Amino acid sequence: MKYKVSIDVSTVYELLGSFMIYATRKWTDNLDIGKQLITDMDERLPQHVRVQFSNARIWPLADYDVLYALIMLRGEQQTIPDFLKWIETSPVEQLHERLVLHLPLLTRNELSRIREHYSPLMKLWYEYYFKTVERDLSQLLEEDAEEKKALLPKMDDENLIEYASGGVILDSVPQEHVILFPGTHFRPINTYCFYENTLLLQYPIDVPEEDEDEPPVVLLRMTEALADPERLRLLRYIADDPKAVSEMAAELGQPYEELMHHLMILRAAGLLRSHLKSENNERFSLRPDGASELQMFLENYIRLS
């Protein structure tokens, strides 16, 4: 299927992604920075601020679809302070008019609640955390986005999406417009939002390694993923055809949650591809390049020539 692919880049996406990790405390077992970010910020934040953030743990995850859509529609509000001021001061009717094209079921009351809940917390997150890392991350994000933009006229849509995302295959999704944006806090996994005619897909980029004598993170992900015999058997089972988690659970007689945990580790290690058809329809298959990349990273680290 032919998609209209574009590359977006903004530290506002990264602000929200890092806030989402800390506020929800989900996915941390599969993120490079997840547990450390939570530990560091729990120690750094004043007690009254931590209490305010704790309220967000019970709010609907669907709220983040609305917040990501606002970033996607930010227009001239390119800086984080400008963006936060825009969503805080714009009339709800005006914001809703723009959002409803992408989220037709969103009501004005829901939008008002989301703005009231998240605006002050995102301002606090920016002041206490993100402002300290923004400059360094901005350069990394901009450089990677420029690389992907240069590939737009050179690669077909599906190959570019798979390359940028490290293995996401779009299985004839109905969304014609795909917006890719780079991020670091969710590495090494992808996050995505399905809208009316747009798929917003975050792809992870690695930060530079500080110590060349230490094994690179990407190699550690691979070797740790393959160290478990259960995951090795799972790779062999998946090798034939793409399979959904529910299908695997029924055929293998294993709990859905346990299988999903193993699949997330293998996917994060770059050993699986993710076939997306819709928000709740995902299948997994073996990523052919995974084994060769393992050999390359291992040889580079131990300096085999």
Image: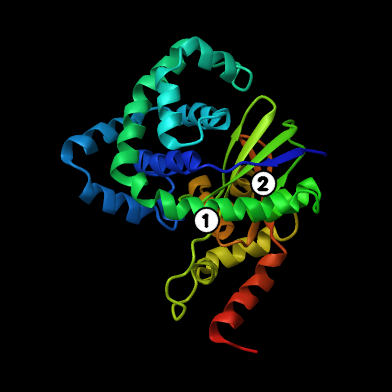
Visible in this render: residue 250? yes
68 or 123, nearer to the observer: 123
Q: Where residue 80 is drawn, which disc sits there?
A: none
First in sequence: mark 2 or mark 1?
1
Q: Are marks 2 and 1 in contact (CB under 8 Å)?
A: no
Q: Secondary structure at mark 1?
A: helix
Q: Quadrant of the C terminus?
A: bottom right
Left or right: residue 11 compared with residue 58:
right
- Indicate whether 168 appears above or below 302: above
185 or 71, nearer to the observer: 71
- Indicate whether 193 appears above or below 235: above
Where in the figure is residue 209, as x and y percent of width and height?
47, 69
Q: Which residue is mark 2?
A: 283
Q: Secondary structure at mark 2?
A: strand
> Based on the displayed image, in which of its 4 quarters is residue 80 positioned?
top left
Residue furthest to the left: 47
Where in the figure is residue 111, as x and y percent of width and height?
46, 17
| Callout in the foreground (2, 1) | 1
Left or right: residue 24 compared with residue 277:
left
Label 1 neighbour load within 10 Å: few <14, some 14-19, many 20+: some
Left or right: residue 237 compared with residue 155:
left
Amino acid at circle 1: Leu
Q: Residue at x 59, y 81 (%)?
A: 300
Q: Where residue 140 is drawn, which disc sits there?
A: 1
Q: Residue at x 64, y 52 (%)?
A: 146
Amino acid at circle 2: Arg
